[in-house]
Image: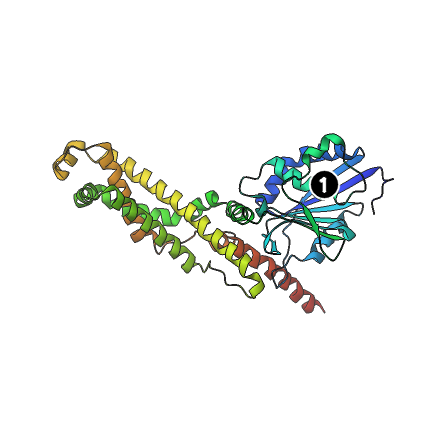
Amino acid sequence: MLDSSSQALRVLLVADPGLPSRRVTSIRDDFESLLQRAYSVQTTLRTRTNALRLTPDQELDLDAVTELREDYDDTDILLVLTEIPRHTQGDPLVAEIHADSNLAIVSCPTLGAWATKKRLLKVLMSSINRLVPWDPANDSHKYLLNWSHWSTRDDQDHQTLHAHTFTGGPRMLLGMTIANDPWRTVPKLSGALAAASATGAFGIFYSSIWQMSTFLSTARLVSIGLAAIIVMVGWLIISHKLWDKPVTEGLATVIMYYNLSTVLTLLITVVALYATLVALILLGGVVVIDPEFMTQQIQSEASFANYLDIAWLSAAMGVVAGGIGASFDSDFDVRSLTHGQRMRQRVYAEQQDEDDRIDDT
């Protein structure tokens, strides 16, 4: 247990794989230097990547968290940065302190989609400051929180830091979406892209598509594209069973965030897929379709806008006719796609461990 006479501070920072681990890597050196300056004692910061487990009722398994100390006997403070979205007392939970075990847990999604290093350092430093017996140096007060306050309920050893009532929800939703890595999801739909490209390519060779795209208004073309995107998002959710249902009433709010982040993640992914398809068809159209021949077919002077209209309508046709029925390239891609999928794996891992222990007895 730390006391004011201690001459050293040993911190273990454990992060979930993925975005939390990448953020820890980006701040590690700055965080260690800041700890050294703040408390003027010999500081050791060790980092570790480890997937945290959930209990069957979707709560963070604190027993499994504290077990992480076993490989580091001399650890004074255990910090945990998790991708698990946490919501208590009606607001997103940014962090919580368990002073009796020198443990601080920070939820990465509640920091937002574009959490700066400074914001993450502030939360980590504020958490550390609730656990150490020393006051921070004057020049370190700038790293303490000024946009939210810690609260203590019945147990003085348990303190919580909640996000703002109005901005916390949207910030957590965006944080969950970015944690799903939507940009990295696009290559996992290469099969769908190939099928959609093959179907959309017909638009390059059929003059009836040229005439229709010329006749339709911009508003109607945009509406067709949006409808194609929505249909494909809906298909991916239904075909891969990505819509979660709360097992208990207490989980309804968190599951709502799971589902909203899934929709937003897939929306970003499919929009990127659609844009890629438009670019490919546009390039093919410019190469294949002679402007004079197009002018004869559409009975007006061909322009770049006509090529773009053809690509847009053909891409919509490709997404609906070719992309529907296609899926992710592997089951692993689906299992790691959304928060709901990854959270279920954490529970399954815990249940599997229990089954293994029963088999061994």
Does residue 335 sit above or below 126 in this rendering?
A: below
Q: Residue at x 71, y 58 (%)?
A: 63
Q: Tell me where residue 122 appears, x and y as whole percent.
A: 66, 38
Q: Residue at x 65, y 66 (%)?
A: 355
> Quick one: 135 or 47, which is closer to the camera?
135
Q: Is residue 189 left or right of residue 162?
A: left
Q: Is residue 324 left or right of residue 289?
A: right
Q: Tell me where residue 307 appears, x and y as whole percent.
A: 24, 36
> Quick one: 248 or 355, which is closer to the camera?
248
Does residue 286 sit above or below 11 in this rendering?
A: above
Q: Residue furthest top?
A: 139
**Please, what secondary structure does the residue beneath circle 1 have?**
strand
Q: Is residue 285 left or right of residue 254?
A: left
> Quick one: 103 or 54, which is closer to the camera?
103
Q: Tell me where residue 11 appears, x and y as whole percent.
A: 75, 42
Name the residue beneath numbered marker 1. 46
Q: Residue at x 41, y 48 (%)?
A: 267
User: Is the C terminus in the top left, top right, bottom left or bottom right quadrant?
Assistant: bottom right
